[in-house]
Amino acid sequence: MKKPRHFISLLDLTGDELRQLIDRAMTLKHVRDHDYQPLKGQVLGMIFEKSSTRTRVSFETGMAHFGGHAVFLSPRDTQLGRGEPIADSAKVISRMVDCVMLRTHEHETVVKFTENSRVPVINGLTDREHPCQLLADMQTYFEHRGDIRGKTVAWIGDGNNMCHSYIHASMLLDFNLHIAAPKAYLPNSEIVALAGERVKFFDNTVDAAKDVDLVATDVWASMGQEDEQKLREIAFKDYQVDTKVMAAAKPDALFMHCLPAHRGEEVSADVIDGKQSVVFDEAENRLHSQKALLELLLCGNAKISLLND
Ligand code: CP
Ligand code: NVA
């Protein structure tokens, strides 16, 4: 049996593949051809062990556009929630569906699922990485400003799953990344080490944002960290993206946030609702970039070229 191609980390793509995928996502966004159904009859299983709005709606809609179908599975209603081993679940589910998207807590769960799956597995977010979001963020940057190579991005706040995937993006697309995070919430040092000189750390948000092309942030307490909310509000109080931070960036700098956002915590309302913010383009691009991803994992090149003719 041919080994399936998985997408559990942004590093599962090469830089060239990521650029091609972004290009393809931009084509798919502008060519809404309802006769183009490359995944007719195919099924995506979507396992959500955490909440979701964007990831669920974008994958489900993308499969429908492509003539396929998506099945929503939650631990509440499946045997996963009653302790069926992840390896057994992967063996069973992957004998029935054509692709699986998994959103879960430990990254190792996705790795284990992948090792036992006959079909491509997509990481829909783990505590360590959120690669699908970076496909959309990078598409959004390319749409508004062109190639990100050689540009500088400021990551403000938690050194979390999003921050890790930004580090991976900086490696693949060759941009500089400035990180301002409290000392106790820095990103994983092994992930940082992979990126070498591209990643630099700053003690305060304004210094990190000085002359950058893009400012990005995320919630102070991620899913699963709700008990730490109060503690984190104290630790992160000097890490809000506000107008002072945006004023330090280049005048045409963009602001991004994967959403959902907490106005008044990690970002002020005037920034997220202001002119430099592209957060809703980012959210929409989840749909287009994931359609490009599904094509890459599930279709042959012949099919992909159809829409380009
Ligand atoms: N950005 C993101 O992944 O959103 P959801 O949690 O709503 O899927
Ligand atoms: N860091 C956030 C991202 C949500 C899309 C979380 O993991 O909850």
Image (spheres, rainbow, N blue to C red):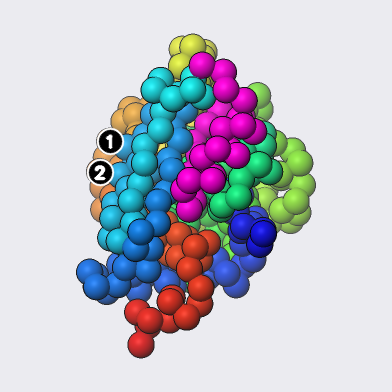
Looking at the image, which residue is at 66% across and 27% down?
183
Q: Badge 2 is on which residue?
A: 273
Q: In the image, is residue 102 part of the stretch drawn in magenta?
A: yes
Q: Where does the magenta region start and end? A: 82-106
The residue depicted at 66 percent of the width and 42 percent of the height is 116
Dividing the picture into quarters, in which one does residue 252 lie?
bottom left
Few, some or many residues within 10 Å of mark 1 (<14, 14–19, 20+): some
Residue assigned mark 1: 269
Given the image, on which type of amino acid does mark 2 rest?
Asp
Q: Secondary structure at mark 1?
A: helix
Q: Residue 303: x, y in percent?
A: 43, 76
Horizontal side of residue 138 vs 127, given as left or right: left
Within 8 Å: ligand 1 and the Cβ of disc 2? no
Q: Callout 2 environment at 10 Å: few (<14), some (14 to 19), or many (20+)?
A: some
Which quadrant would the N terminus be assigned to in this image? bottom right
Tag 1–tag 2 contact (CB < 8 Å): yes
Q: Quadrant of the C terminus?
A: bottom left
Q: Amino acid at mark 1?
A: Ala
| Residue 259 part of the magenta segment | no
Residue 94 percent coordinates (x, y): 54, 45
